[in-house]
Amino acid sequence: MNDDELDPLVLAALRDVVPASDALREQHIAAALAEISPAEARSRFTWLSAAAAVVVLLVGATAIVRLGATSTDSNVTPRNGAITTVPVKGSACGAELVDYTIVGTYSSAGSVREVWSSAQNLVVVDQASCAQLGTFTHPAATANEKTCDGFFSTTDTQWVGAYSVAGTTLTLIATTNELQIRDGSCAVIASYPLPAQS
């Protein structure tokens, strides 16, 4: 499966998954194998279910290990073919941003910008220097359970990431000249000029 076939939210979530330790993986396999031990009272359905569980665990563990091994890659090719740097969880810039979580990155003026969110605002940081380039207050948004899914990067837009504020999932999009915050229906509820390099 090619990474650019997955929804960006799924990719971001998978990159944040910590690979299972060998001990945990062995424990799960042992538990599944214990379910298929020979016993007169067990039905064929139970045996097949346990075998399926073992296969799912092995495939899942392999996928998690592969993602863990590749999650430190600095580049991924989005649908438009441009190279966008993907942040490593716990970016060096994060030390300055206590109580913030990273939303994602976008490219602008030949450099990569990280966007971080707190309960009150968004902060744009230059990934190379960790200099804070701009701070934007979250817009007022009505709480809802919808998420703006299916938005893909194009030549003029970059999907930065999704984040939650006050029970609402918002999506951050970078265009050639502004950051757009979109609500669950993908409507733009706020936009801010891209901060200039300091």
Image: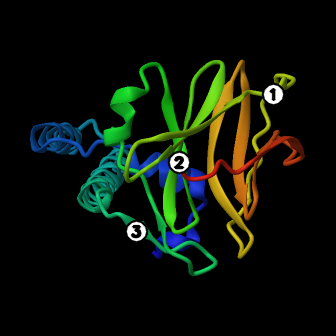
Looking at the image, residue 51 sits to the left or right of residue 181; the answer is left
Query: Height in image: 129 above or below 159?
Result: above
- The numbered disc on residue 63 is none
Query: Disc 1 marks which residue?
Result: 139
Q: Residues within 10 Å of mark 3 (few under 14, many from 20)?
A: few
Under circle 1, the secondary element is loop
* Residue sitting nearer the eye, 6 or 124: 124
* Residue sitting nearer the eye, 36 or 150: 150
Q: Residue furthest bottom?
A: 81
> Residue 159 location, x and y as percent?
65, 57
Q: Distance between the Cα atoms at labels 2 and 1?
A: 25 Å
Q: Earlier in the sequence, mark 2 or mark 1?
A: 1
Kindly identify the residue that appears in the image at 45 percent across and 69 percent down. Answer: 76
Query: Disc 3 marks which residue?
Result: 75
Looking at the image, residue 88 sits to the left or right of residue 19; the answer is right
* Type of amino acid under label 3: Asn
Give the tally of numbered discs: 3
Q: Residues within 10 Å of mark 2 (few under 14, many from 20)?
A: few
Query: Disc 2 marks which residue?
Result: 198
